[in-house]
Image (cartoon, rainbow, N blue to C red):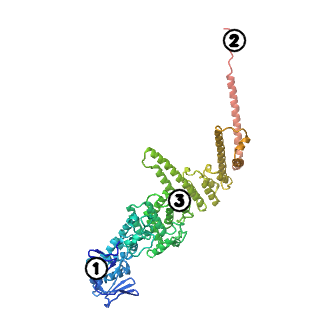
Amino acid sequence: MWDSETESFGGRDFSNGVLTTGKHGVKTDGFELRGQSWYVATDIPSDLLVLIGDVSFHLHKYPLLSRSGKLNRIIYGSRDTELNKMVLDDIPGGPEAFELVAKFCYGIAVDLTAPIISGLRCAAEYLEMTEDLEEGNLIFKTEAFLSYVVLSSWRDSILVLKSCEKLSPWAENLQIVRRCSESIAWKACANPKGIRWQYTGKPLRVSSPKWNEMKDSSPSRNQQVPPDWWFEDVSILRIDHFVRVITAIKVKGMRYELIGAVIMHYASKWLPGLIKEGLGSGEPGDDGSNSTNSNESSSIWKGGLHMIVAGIKEDIPTVQAKDQRMIIESLISIIPPQRDCVSCSFLLRLLRLANMLKVAPALVTELEKRVGMQFEQAQLADLLIPCYNKSESLYDVDLVQRLLEHFLVQEQSESSSPARQSFSDKNMYDSAQRGTNSNAKMRVARLLDSYLTEVSRDRNLSLTKFQVLAEALPESARTCDDGLYRAIDSYLKAHPTLTEHERKRLCRVMDCQKLSIDACMHAAQNERLPLRVVVQVLFSEQVKISNAIANNSLKEASESQYQPLISNRKTLLEGTPQSFQEGWAAAKKDINALKFELESVKTKYLELQNEMETLQRQFDKMAKPKQTSAWMAGWRKLSKIGKTTENNDMAFQVANAETKKMPRRWRNSIS
C-alpha cells in the first residue's frame, strides 16, 4: 500500500489518495447542500442543471464539459443550443458518485477511499472522462488508485468488491470484480505470517491501512495464525461475488477442507438456523455476530438473510424465496467433489432447504449423491425431513430411500474398484476395505432402524414403504434385529387396523434368530405380534439356550482335561463364586420358565389346529349335502343288478375253466 509520501505516475501528482486537478475555470469555496439540491459556492450563476433521481445539481457547463466527453456530446450534439438541463438517472453510483465527479471537475480535493473508488471509477467511465480531453483525467487517477492501492490491500479488496454489488454490469465490464477476486484469492492462499496484513477479528477500516499500521496490528512471527483467518471477511460478500472468490481460490490450489469450511461458514451467516439447531429452530437474531453482519448487509441486498420456516405454504415471499434459492444453488455448485470436505449434517440440512424452495432437480440429485457418499455420518435429527410435495405422509421416506440407494451404490463401487497395488498390499487393502464397508453398513443399519422407529408413528405411512425401506440393506448389515423389532412394534401400535396377513408380511422383514434375550422376552408377551411369529421367537430362543448349554458343557469338558477333578458336588459348590451360583440359579429358572411357556404355546397351537380341522370337516359336510332322486335311485338299482349278473357269469366261466383244466388220468398199460 501507499504511505503518506507522494507517488508520481507519468509526471502527475497523486498525493496521499487525494484527487486534485491543476486547472479549473470557476473559483469556488465548495459545494452547499440545500434540501435535495447541491449549489456551487461562487458568485457566478449556474447555467446547467443535472437531475439524478430526487437530487439536483446546479452547476456550470465549462468545468464539466471540458472533462466529460458524454456531457460534451449531449450539450453540443443537441439541436437545442441553449440546453441547460439534463437527466442522468442511469449513472452508476448514483448522486453520491456524481457529487465526487463534480467536485473533481471544479478542482476540489476528493479523498479517495476503498468504499467509493469503484463507484467513482464506473461514473468516470460512464461520463467518458478520458485522457483525450485532459491529461490526468478521472479515469486514469481512479484506475491508478485501484491498481496500486486497493489490489495490494486485503481489506480494501474486500471493501471494493462489496461496493461493486450496486454497480452491475459496469464493475464486471471494467474487470473490477475479477481483479479484486483474484487479489483476495492470492492473499487467502498465501502465508499470512510472511505477508503480514490485517486479518479478520477487527472492524473494517474505512480508509486503507498503511504499512506501519499493518506491521503494528499484524500477528508476530511467533504467534500462530489460524487457517480460517479469512473466513469472516469473505462471508460478507454477496453470493455471486463469493462464488467468484471461491472459484479463484480453487484455481490457486487451496485445500478442499478449508474450502468446505468457508462454504459452511458462509451458509451459517446468510442462512441462519441451517447450522445451529435445524430448520426453523430459531429466529435470525439468535446468532449474535451473525445477525449483526446480516443486518448490516441487508441494506445492500434484500433477501437471503432469514430462514423460511413455513413448510409448503403458497404465500412465501417471492423475492426472498428466489434469493435463498440462488444462494443454495450456488453453494451446491461450488462444494468440492472430495469426500468429507463438508459434514453430512450440513449437506442434509441444505438438502432440506433445497426441497422446500424447489431448487433445480439436477442440483438436488447431485446433493443427494453427496449425502450418499458419507451417509454413515448422518444423524437421526437431520434425516427427519418433512415431505414438501403435499403428500399425506409426514416425513419424506422416499428421499431417505434414495439416499440409501446412493450409499449402497457408492459402497459397491468402492469395493469393486480398488487401486492397483502389489499382491500383499492389495490383500491388506481388501481386508481394510471390507472392515470399513461393514462398519459403515452397520452404522447405517442402526441409523435406519432408529429412523423407522420414528416414522412408524405416522399413521399415513404405508406398509409397502416401511417394508421396502426396512429390506433395503443386505442381511449382513444387521448383527442384531432389536432395533428393527422396535420399529415393527411401533408400527403395529400406530396401525391397529392391520389384517393378520399384513402383520405377518410386516414381521417377515425381521429375523427372529437375531433378537436378543430381552427382545425375545418382550416379543413372547407382545399381543400385537402374530401367533406364528411368537412361536418362532420362542423356538429360536430355545435353540439359543440349548446351543449355549451345549457349548458351555463342551468348554467345561475341555477344561477338565487340564484341571484336577473335583471330588464331589459339595467341593464344586464351594469352589464356585457366590455371584456365579446365584446367576446360574436365576438362569435355570428363566430356562424352565421359557420351556413351560413354550410347551403351553405348543399345546394351545395343537388345540387350535384340532378345532380348525373339526370346523373344516363340518363346513365341508354343510357345503356338499347329499342330493338323490327317484331316477337316480332306479339307475343305481339297475347298475347293481347288472353288476350281480356280471359277477354270476364270471363265476360260471371260472368254474368251466377249472373243469377243463383238470389233470389227465394216465392209463395203465401193460406195454
**For the residue marked with disc 2, what is the amino acid?**
Asn
Using residue 13 as the reference point, say whether residue 158 is left or right of it.
Answer: right
Q: Earlier in the sequence, mark 1 or mark 2?
A: 1
Q: CA distance from mark 2 to mark 3?
A: 116 Å
Give the answer, above or below, for where 36 lies relative to 255.
below
What residue would you read off at disc 2? 668
Give the answer, above or below, for where 492 lies relative to 266.
above
**For the residue marked with disc 3, what is the amino acid?**
Ala
**For the residue marked with disc 1, what is the amino acid?**
Gly
Q: Earlier in the sequence, mark 2 or mark 3?
A: 3
Q: Residue at x 47, y 62 (%)?
A: 364
Residue 420: give x, y in percent of width and height: 42, 48
User: Can you tell which quarter of the image residue 88 is in?
Assistant: bottom left
Q: CA distance from mark 1 to mark 2?
A: 166 Å
What residue would you read off at disc 3? 378
Nearest-to-viewer mark from 1 and 2: 1
Give the answer, above or below, for where 209 lies relative to 528.
below
Number of disc labels: 3
What residue would you read off at disc 1? 69
> Pointer 1: residues within 10 angstroms few (<14), some, or many (20+)?
some
Residue 264: give x, y in percent of width and height: 47, 65
Q: Earlier in the sequence, mark 3 or mark 1?
A: 1
Viewer can see residue 376: yes
> Pointer 3: residues within 10 angstroms few (<14), some, or many (20+)?
many
> 143 and 37: which one is in front?
143
> 526 and 646: which one is in front?
526
Residue 123: give x, y in percent of width and height: 34, 77
Quadrant location of the C terminus in the rendered image: top right
